[in-house]
Amino acid sequence: MKNYFLQLFNSMKKWIPQMFGGFFKWIILSLITGTAVGFISSAFHIGLEKCADIRKEQPYIILLLPVAGLLIVSIYKLLKLTHDKGTNMVLIAVRDGSGMTWKNTLSIFTGSILTHLTGGSAGREGAALQIGGSVGSQLGIWFKLNEQDHRLITMCGMSSGFSALFGTPAAAAFFSMEVISVGIMHYSAIIPCSAAALIGFKISSYFGVSPSVMNVKIDSLNWEIYLKASFIAILCGLLSIVFCFVLKNSARIYRYFIRNPYLRIFIGGLLVVILTFICGTYDYNGAGSEVIAKAFETRAPFQQFILKLLFTALTLGAGFKGGEILPVFFVGSTFGSFIAPLLDLDCSLGAAIGLSCLFCGVTNCPVTALFLCIELFGVKTLPICLITCAIAYMFSGYAGLYSEQKILYSKLEPKFIDKKVGKK
């Protein structure tokens, strides 16, 4: 017995200092990263809101979209980021330990502001991931962290940026751990990412960035509702394949026909302007947050999810900046809102299922999608979101928004496959 306690004491003497040392080290680094990213992301959010207000007051500012495109290309060329890969750069930085710098922060910040100000169809969370990831990576360079720690601090930045902009700290923390490699979770980052996400959330809340909360009507859950919801989830899984295909190939088509980046983004801007006036509405310009909220209140028209996908493909494919996540929310919520009444379900429930399932399908992040449901729709949606997100994850196949994302394990069997999304 004495030897047993002696062994236990010697063992604890070795690992307790390591655990406490690592814990306090990452609490401090998370505090620094979360604070820096929280302030920058809050400024970014406020800037985007101002852009939306200006666009409402001066709708014809959309005519400047092609000019804004030229400015964006010029900024990226000036900063020597002509081969920038967007959010994929953050995934590469985490997986390979490569560095991102303040140039990435500045470029995506200004590029997204210009895109939203002049009416490009883009989101903001993808931009927040790039801002947060690049700030975290730059801090890692300044602090001279080793490769493993550099990866973690980049993930901290991603979590803080996502959380500050969208007000979902739990989803933000797990997204950074889940999105890099599908099939495994980077649990070594759970304390750093959780701390950074909470700090970013608190800072943005201080500046008046309120979290989005949707009202979902669920009177009761029975087998019939589960079956109908599962059907919507299957459709969303298939829709996620279409979404990723359209966004991926829009950029390819642009590059194939128009090699000059200045001409490409100028023509892309013109196409968005023309399509806006053809549609006779500005619903598809910008992030589309108001349309998303409306999809939870009344049934969305059939054409909304199709047109938003088209607007987003024309915008991002041409080289405008922003994110893909809010367009995913737009397409998913309006699709679900339209389909649900056909199945005798409330449009708010359909919108919630559509939003969460399409997000799950395009990002391959079912755990994050589940936390997102809880934070956006309330814990009452947990049972139905659990099954629908799982179904959407399977039916989305091996498609994905981020070409640098790796699928490590098969979605159909416990088999190691290790391939990038979209690869056969």
Image (cartoon, rainbow, N blue to C red):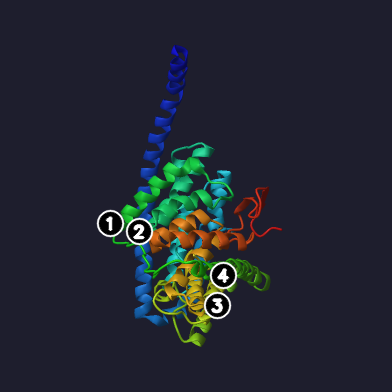
- In this rendering, the label closer to the viewer, 3 or 2: 3
The kind of residue tagged 3 is Ile
Instruction: State left or right for residue 312 relative to residue 30.
Output: right
Where residue 279 appears, x then y in whole percent? 50, 85
- In this rendering, the label closer to the viewer, 3 or 4: 4
Where residue 105 appears, x then y in whole percent? 45, 55
Sequence-earlier tag: 1 or 3: 1
| Residue 227 higher or lower than 13, as above or below | below
Callout 4 environment at 10 Å: few (<14), some (14 to 19), or many (20+)?
A: some
Sequence-earlier tag: 4 or 2: 2
Using the image as rendered, state which of residue 176 and residue 380 is in the foreground: 380
Looking at the image, the residue that sits furthest to the top is 2
**Residue named by callout 4:** 231
Of the 4 image quadrants, the one containing the C terminus is: bottom right
Q: Are marks 4 and 2 in contact (CB under 8 Å)?
A: no
Q: Secondary structure at mark 3?
A: helix
What is the distance, in whole Å, between disc 3 and disc 2 at their CAs?
Answer: 31 Å
Using the image as rendered, state which of residue 264 and residue 48 is in the foreground: 48
Residue 42's mark?
A: 2
Callout 2 environment at 10 Å: few (<14), some (14 to 19), or many (20+)?
A: many
| Residue 44 higher or lower than 23, as above or below | below
What is the distance, in whole Å, between disc 4 and disc 1 at their CAs?
Answer: 41 Å
Sequence-earlier tag: 4 or 1: 1
- In this rendering, the label closer to the viewer, 4 or 1: 4
**Residue named by callout 3:** 306
Q: Secondary structure at mark 2?
A: helix
**Residue named by callout 1:** 206
